[in-house]
């Protein structure tokens, strides 16, 4: 039987499934059993997707998110949160969702096509057309998602 050092009390105890590189701050890996009375965590799989978008930029202050102004990215991000593809805690932590844009635009500039990549909380068997339809229902008329395409984990839309 494996044994690990209990960090709190400094004693050796039977291993509870912690493996090399596993979290040791109270979190457990997905294979470890839940403790009695512990709440079940909503574990929706994530997948990298490229969103092909287009917009009329007349009422926006550019594509890139800026505080205190309306931007296209902010509108898309809000739609992703309302559609529950990104959790509400994401705006302060977009790097966690691998958020990238292929290019930027200035205030009032339109874009027929631009690409955003993001890690969405969506099962792999969910049809890409479903994601597009659901996002377009949440977006204003001057911003549209034309396509959603699964990508590799290391996708870089700038290249």
Image (tube, helix red, strand yellow):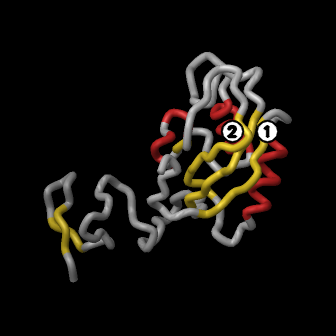
Q: Position of residue 153 (x, y in %)?
A: 48, 61
Q: Is tag 2's residue or tag 1's residue first in the polypeptide sequence?
A: 2
Where 36 falls versus 54 (above or below)?
below
Binning the other alpha carbons within 10 Å of mark 1 as few (below 14), some (14 to 19) or many (20 upward) gives some
Q: CA distance from mark 2 to mark 1?
A: 7 Å
Relative to 95, 139 lies left or right: right
Could you say where residue 23 lies in the image, as x and y percent from the top left?
Answer: 32, 59
Give the x, y percent position of residue 67.
Answer: 56, 20
User: Dot 2: what SS?
Assistant: helix
Q: Nearer the viewer, residue 76 or 1?
A: 76
Residue at the location (56% across, 59% down)? 48
User: Where residue 31 sits: x, y (%)?
Assistant: 43, 73
Q: Residue at x 51, y 40 (%)?
A: 94
The residue that mark 2 highlights is: 76
- 139 lies above or below 117: above
Q: Are marks 2 and 1 in contact (CB under 8 Å)?
A: yes
Left or right, 1 with respect to 135, comes to left
Q: Residue furthest bottom?
A: 1
Seen at 57% across and 28% down, the residue is: 65
Question: Few, some or many C-alpha atoms within 10 Å of disc 2 (few <14, some 14-19, many ≥20)?
Answer: many
Residue at 32%, 73% in the rendered image: 17
| Total numbered labels placed on residues in the image | 2
Q: Is residue 77 left or right of residue 57?
A: left
Image quadrant where residue 128 sits: bottom right
The residue tagged 1 is 139
From where the camera sits, is residue 43 visible? yes
Q: For this view, does 96 lie left or right of residue 137?
A: left
Q: Is residue 40 visible?
A: no
In the picture, the disc for residue 119 is: none
């Amino acid at each position: 039987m494996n044994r690990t050092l209990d960090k709190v009390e400094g004693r050796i105890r039977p291993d509870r499934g912690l493996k090399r590189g596993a979290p040791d701050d109270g979190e457990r890996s997905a294979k470890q059993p839940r403790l009695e009375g512990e709440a079940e965590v909503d574990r929706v799989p994530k997948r990298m997707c490229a969103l092909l978008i287009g917009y009329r930029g007349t009422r926006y202050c550019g594509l890139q998110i800026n505080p205190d102004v309306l931007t296209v990215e902010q509108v898309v991000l809000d739609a992703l949160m309302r559609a529950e593809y990104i959790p509400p805690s994401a705006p302060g932590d977009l790097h966690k969702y691998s958020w990238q844009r292929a290019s930027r635009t200035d205030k009032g500039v339109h874009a027929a096509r631009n690409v955003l990549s993001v890690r969405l909380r969506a099962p792999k068997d969910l049809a890409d057309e479903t994601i597009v339809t659901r996002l377009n229902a949440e977006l204003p008329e001057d911003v549209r998602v034309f396509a959603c395409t699964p990508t590799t984990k290391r996708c870089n839309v700038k290249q």
